[in-house]
């Protein structure tokens, strides 16, 4: 028979402190100096500790029930003992305890450490406690009512000054998006964050708390300052901890207020620009980032102290998971802790908002990591981030749900939940008809867009509405540079041919003869190139039709650049819709599929049609300039610096759609969107194809 495990003994170096009163109940704080960590204990845990020397769960629970009002059970004592052992608050008395301490002290493998720490790495820089202690007499006035009143008045004055000069203040934001503005923001943030952390340190030392460390943390490779104010757990009054929580933001508000007031009175110049950058960036980040309770910034600790719930996120997450499992499966396990009904609902809302925020935050961080390195490594790192911070927690909770089903397979609540999940899975897995939306342009079926091939001066241009025959000149340009190049080539050819015909070459002059002939060939090629370029300056109609969309700002005598659009030639008999479908959707579309076009105009009618053709490869440039993002369209594109063409950022395919019925003559291009009926596929299949397409494209496979 195995001997019972020895009773865990508390470490001798632990310090027991009196804690604050929370919701009318006293608490105690257990300080672990080895880890510089505090553990908050409730009344029942304190009663258990007072009888810890009884060294038996049944005896401890029975004595607590007899001498107090708590209904302590042996399971509660055992669970508390397991918590103390896991937290490293007990001495190692067995080989299992020694193995646990060894695992906690063992450094993880290098690869595992990198994967868990390259997003957040904290480095200690200094111990500011001695300096802050000497500054306490000099900073006591910051915690007086007079200072609070003065700061409130100063903030009001700063707001009034900004309102009076709002147009100038708002105009300064345009400077922030420049490279110089980005550098200014970085310097302003460095200054404001140093003041922020100094505010926390001064407030903590004012209330007698040690500040053993200040340093820098790298959050997604971005440096962020931090201050160790863990000692604030010693404070009994929640108001004192709130002051420490708010001190950093108050320090930034003081800085922003001073910068705003000085900005309003100094003349224009570098000093005023710097003050604007400091005030605007400090105001925005203080209000938008530090006040957020969804991440562990100042707002989180403020909310935690206001509610009197230490470790707010972990406890609300545990409570919400328990409530969710109880709702889905009707389990009868006890809650992790008891909250009033109203507070429980509030905590559920908070935890769900935090989960949603974290989902998008970690997904965004994964995208930042992906774009920060080369594509192949970026895909791997993004996958790791998505797995560790998004997919793995979800899979862990789904595993717990599966265990709940196995523990209560015949429960009515389990049957209802199982049916709901079956319907959801069916909706995700079964193929469903869907539509693909894509930007499009309604135009004449026969159309030819005319672009300049080389720079030149306009000498002839037909106006919009002109009827032309096939081969008729629509526009003619003249390039003095090309004319000069052709004239120079002709003159050089004449000189070389004259030299060749007049000069007598002997046997010894064979090399000179060959050199002259080579030069004649080179100049002939140069003349032909210049003449071909001159011919391309004359743009003709490829078929009979009407000239439309001639830019009204182009006139005879104007100089155009290479690849400038000068109009289109269309036929008036039939219309077509030219759509641009992204690569992730093109595989779901087949020729003959039903489609409909809706113009962007408010009173437009839907035009039904069908897919006529799909381009075999992605288009190298966008002909429908109306749909390019450079011109306010839906397709992200940029202008190529070499060819001056509009190139899409992502692979898009051209899809031609013909209307099912006759339409009035189309004399201008109309921008809109199309909906194309795609082949029936499941949501899982579509998602899988898109993910694989992105992975293959970005990894270069």
Image (spheres, grey):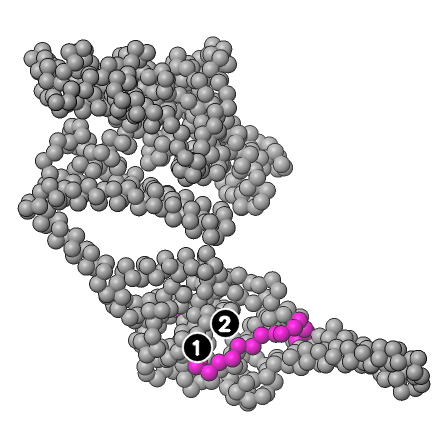
Across and down, in percent, residue 68 comes to 10, 13
Residue 236 is situated, as x and y percent measured from the top left of the image, at: 29, 14
Which mark identifies residue 625? none
Q: Main secondary structure of the magenta part?
A: strand
Work out whether 661 lies above or below 258: below
Residue occupying image coordinates x 23% and y 60%: 429
For residue 612, above or below residue 8 = below
Quarter of the figure with the N terminus: top left
Q: Quadrant of residue 335?
A: top left
**How many other residues sit within 10 Å of disc 2, few (<14), some (14-19) or many (≥20)?**
some
Residue 208 magenta-drawn?
A: no
Question: Disc count in the image?
Answer: 2
Depicted 617 relative to depicted 183: above or below:
below
Q: Residue at x 65, y 73 (%)?
A: 454
Using residue 518 as the reference point, say whether residue 101 is left or right of it: left
Q: Residues within 10 Å of mark 1 (few under 14, many from 20)?
A: many
Q: Quadrant of residue 60?
A: top left
Does the magenta portion include 448? yes
Helix, strand or loop for disc 2: loop
- x, y percentage for residue 560? 64, 70
Q: Which residue is mark 2?
A: 623
| Nearer to me, 489 or 238 | 489
Secondary element at tag 1? strand
Q: Give the residue at x 60% y 71%.
A: 563
Q: Quadrant of the C terminus?
A: bottom left
Please tell me which residue lies in front, 83 or 260.
Answer: 83
Residue at 47% from the left image edge and 15% from the top image edge: 129
* N-terminal-most mark, 1 or 2: 1
Q: Viewed as shown, does residue 513 lie left or right of 173?
A: right
Q: Give the residues drawn in magenta, as a range.
A: 440-459
Tag 1 residue: 443
């Amino acid at each position: 028979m195995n001997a019972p495990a020895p009773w865990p003994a508390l470490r001798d170096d632990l310090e027991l402190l009196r804690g604050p009163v929370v919701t009318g109940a006293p608490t105690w704080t257990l300080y672990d100096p080895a880890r510089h960590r505090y553990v908050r204990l409730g009344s029942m845990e304190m009663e258990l500790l007072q009888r810890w020397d009884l060294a038996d769960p049944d005896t401890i629970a029975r004595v607590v029930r007899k001498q107090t009002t708590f209904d302590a059970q042996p399971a509660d004592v055992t669970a508390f003992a397991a918590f103390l052992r896991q937290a490293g608050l007990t001495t190692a008395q067995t080989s299992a305890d020694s193995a646990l301490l060894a695992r906690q002290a063992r450094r993880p493998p290098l690869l595992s450490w990198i994967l868990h720490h390259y997003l957040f790495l904290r480095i200690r820089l200094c111990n500011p406690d001695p300096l802050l202690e000497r500054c306490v007499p000099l900073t006591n006035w910051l915690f007086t009512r007079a200072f609070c009143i003065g700061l409130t008045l100063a903030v009001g004055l700063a707001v009034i000054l900004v309102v009076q000069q709002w147009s100038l203040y708002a105009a300064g934001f345009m400077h922030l998006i420049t490279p110089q503005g980005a550098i200014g923001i970085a310097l302003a943030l460095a200054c404001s964050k140093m003041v922020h952390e100094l505010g926390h340190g001064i407030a903590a030392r004012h209330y007698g708390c040690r500040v053993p460390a200040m340093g820098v943390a790298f959050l997604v490779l971005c440096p962020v300052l931090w201050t160790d104010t863990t000692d604030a757990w010693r404070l009994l009054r929640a108001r004192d901890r709130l002051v420490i929580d708010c001190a950093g933001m108050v320090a930034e508000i003081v800085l922003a207020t001073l910068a705003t007031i000085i900005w309003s009175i100094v003349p224009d110049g570098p000093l005023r620009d710097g003050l604007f950058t400091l005030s605007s960036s400090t105001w925005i980040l203080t209000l938008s980032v530090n006040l957020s309770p969804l991440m562990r910034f100042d707002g989180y600790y403020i909310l935690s102290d206001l509610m009197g719930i230490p470790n707010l996120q972990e406890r609300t997450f545990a409570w919400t998971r328990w409530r969710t499992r109880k709702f889905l499966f009707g389990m009868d396990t006890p809650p992790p802790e008891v909250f009033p009904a109203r507070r429980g609902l509030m905590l559920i809302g908070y935890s769900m908002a935090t989960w949603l925020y974290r989902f998008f935050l970690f997904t965004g961080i994964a995208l930042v990591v992906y774009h920060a390195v080369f594509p192949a490594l970026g895909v791997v790192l993004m996958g790791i981030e998505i797995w560790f911070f998004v997919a793995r927690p979800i899979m862990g909770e789904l595993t717990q749900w599966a265990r709940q089903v196995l523990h209560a397979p015949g429960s009515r609540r389990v049957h209802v939940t199982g049916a709901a999940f079956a319907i959801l899975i069916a909706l995700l897995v079964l193929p469903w008809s869907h539509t693909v939306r894509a930007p499009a342009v309604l135009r004449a079926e026969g159309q030819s867009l005319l672009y300049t091939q080389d720079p030149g001066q306009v000498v002839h241009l037909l106006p919009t509405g002109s009827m032309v025959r096939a081969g008729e000149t629509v526009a003619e340009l003249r390039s003095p540079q090309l004319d000069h190049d052709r004239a120079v080539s002709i003159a050089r050819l004449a000189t070389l041919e004259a030299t060749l015909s007049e000069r007598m070459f002997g046997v010894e002059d064979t090399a000179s003869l060959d050199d002259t002939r080579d030069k004649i060939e080179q100049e002939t090629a140069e003349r032909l190139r210049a003449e071909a370029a001159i011919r391309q300056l004359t743009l003709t109609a490829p078929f009979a039709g009407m000239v439309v969309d001639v830019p009204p700002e182009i006139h005879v005598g104007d100089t155009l650049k290479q690849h400038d659009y000068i109009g289109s030639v269309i036929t008036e008999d039939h219309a077509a819709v030219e759509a641009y479908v992204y690569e992730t959707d093109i595989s779901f579309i087949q020729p003959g599929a039903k489609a409909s076009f809706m113009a962007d105009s408010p009173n437009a009618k839907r035009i039904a049609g069908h897919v006529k053709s799909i381009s075999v490869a992605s288009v190298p440039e966008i002909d429908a300039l109306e749909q390019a993002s450079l011109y306010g369209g839906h397709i992200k594109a940029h202008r190529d610096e070499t060819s001056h063409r509009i190139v899409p950022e992502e692979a898009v395919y051209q899809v031609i759609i013909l209307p099912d019925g006759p339409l009035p003559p189309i004399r201008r291009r109309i921008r809109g969107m199309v909906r194309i009926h795609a082949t029936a596929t499941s949501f899982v299949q579509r998602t899988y194809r898109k993910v694989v397409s992105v992975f293959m494209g970005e990894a270069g496979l």
